[in-house]
Image (spheres, rainbow, N blue to C red):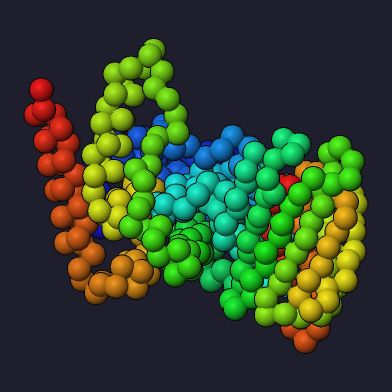
């Protein structure tokens, strides 16, 4: 193996100084790993985009979060819920499908029906959540943990 | 006890270099696979910052990068049995993260073709602190010089900065060039970087 050019060490220090990982990242990853249920079989959706317009400010525009796995796309629209510190979620999955949706927020679990690719959850506490899809005729799908 | 001294000496070989990180990661992964549950936390601690930088090389938003790092860890936990060479766990994690970053970046390009044309210059996240002005100034100059390179060079240099021995096969697929061209491309990118820095230095 040839020696690596020393400028790569400078580059490394520069990126570490100017674009460091978010402070909470390591702890969040340790928590995500600890919470993983090794017995469940599912396909993991990946985040494509998150359009957060002033989240947490009442009256602010909705948050849209988009996930994908192969040809499946999940779009979630998150708005303020009926009470303080709650959120309402409207979701669409394409291609259209029927089944069940399970939303896990800490100790709480909320279920909803997926009909023609659409579901709604009227109120969940804001914070970290994970959404599971049991879709007829397909493998189960799950989002990673994310914040609403 | 000679054996514990040996372990100690392996751990203290150059703790700040990559080799130390690679060795500690492999050890932690071994211990986790043999049933020590908490050892995975050590592995996450060692490798999360490296994964962050490798994924950021794909110029994706912070939220998306965080998700890709999470995707990488969940994939490891769920598919730990498929890791063929536990000694190379650091490389396995980096390749998994890069593949996912590449997939997401390719999908975004497909959906948002304009985005790439209008890529705004990415500004450093950390404002310069006056107490470390000299070092910071050097970093900012280097950042600016990197930002003037094309996207391919930017990605290649950041990936190699955090991964001594990058997987050239996958890089060649991503970049649409033969494996044999990556070495010369790497050299050209470094030359451009150096000349970009000296041009800047020559300005009044």
Residue A130 location, x and y as percent?
76, 57
Residue A88 location, x and y as percent?
82, 52
Nearest to the observer: residue A134 or residue B100:
A134
Q: Determine whether, in the image, residue A2 is placed left or right of residue A55.
A: left
Q: Determine whether, in the image, residue B151 is placed left or right of residue A37.
A: left
The image shows residue B125, relative to residue A49, as above or below, that is above
Q: Quick one: quadrant of the N terminus of chain A? A: bottom left
The image shows residue A41, relative to residue B119, as above or below, that is below
Nearest to the observer: residue A26 or residue A90:
A90
Q: Quadrant of residue A111?
A: bottom right
Image point 31% across, 30% down: which residue?
B139
Nearest to the observer: residue B104 or residue B14:
B104
Nearest to the observer: residue B157 or residue A108:
A108
Image point 33% across, 17% down: which residue?
B133
Residue A75 location, x and y as percent?
67, 64
Q: Determine whether, in the image, residue A19 is placed left or right of residue B190.
A: right
Q: Determine whether, in the image, residue B167 is placed left or right of residue A54.
A: left
Image point 15% across, 48% down: which residue?
B192
Image point 17% across, 55% down: which residue?
B187
Numbered-mark total: 0
């Amino acid at each position: 193996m040839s020696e690596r050019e020393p400028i790569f060490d400078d580059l490394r220090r520069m990126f570490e100084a100017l674009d460091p990982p978010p402070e909470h990242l390591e702890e969040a990853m340790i928590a995500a790993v600890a919470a993983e249920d090794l017995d469940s079989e599912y396909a993991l959706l990946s985040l494509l985009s998150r359009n957060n317009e002033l989240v947490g400010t009442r009256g602010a525009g909705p948050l849209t979060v988009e996930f994908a796995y192969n040809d499946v796309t999940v779009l979630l629209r998150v708005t303020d819920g009926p009470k303080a510190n709650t959120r309402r979620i409207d979701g669409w999955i394409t291609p259209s499908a029927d089944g069940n949706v399970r939303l896990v927020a800490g100790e709480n679990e909320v279920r909803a029906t997926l009909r023609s690719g659409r579901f709604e959850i009227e109120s969940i506490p804001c914070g970290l959540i994970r959404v599971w899809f049991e879709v007829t005729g397909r493998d189960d799908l799950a989002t990673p943990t994310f914040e609403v | 006890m000679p054996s514990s001294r040996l372990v100690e000496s392996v751990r203290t070989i150059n703790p700040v270099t990559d080799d130390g990180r690679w060795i500690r990661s492999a050890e932690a992964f071994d211990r986790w696979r043999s049933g020590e549950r908490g050892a995975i936390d050590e592995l996450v601690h060692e490798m999360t910052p490296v994964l962050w930088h490798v994924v950021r090389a794909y110029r994706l938003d912070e939220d998306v990068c965080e998700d890709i790092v999470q995707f990488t860890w969940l994939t490891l936990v769920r598919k730990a049995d498929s890791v063929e060479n536990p000694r190379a766990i650091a490389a396995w994690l980096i390749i998994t993260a890069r593949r996912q970053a590449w997939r997401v970046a390719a999908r975004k390009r497909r959906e948002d073709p304009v985005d790439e044309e209008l890529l705004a210059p990415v500004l450093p996240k950390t404002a310069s602190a006056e107490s470390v002005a000299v070092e910071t100034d050097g970093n900012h100059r280097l950042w600016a010089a990197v930002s003037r390179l094309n996207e391919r060079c930017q990605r290649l240099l950041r990936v190699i900065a955090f991964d001594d021995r990058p997987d050239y096969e996958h890089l060649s697929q991503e970049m649409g060039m033969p494996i044999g061209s990556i070495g010369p491309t790497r050299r050209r990118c470094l030359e451009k970087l150096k000349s970009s820095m000296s041009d800047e230095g020559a300005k009044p």
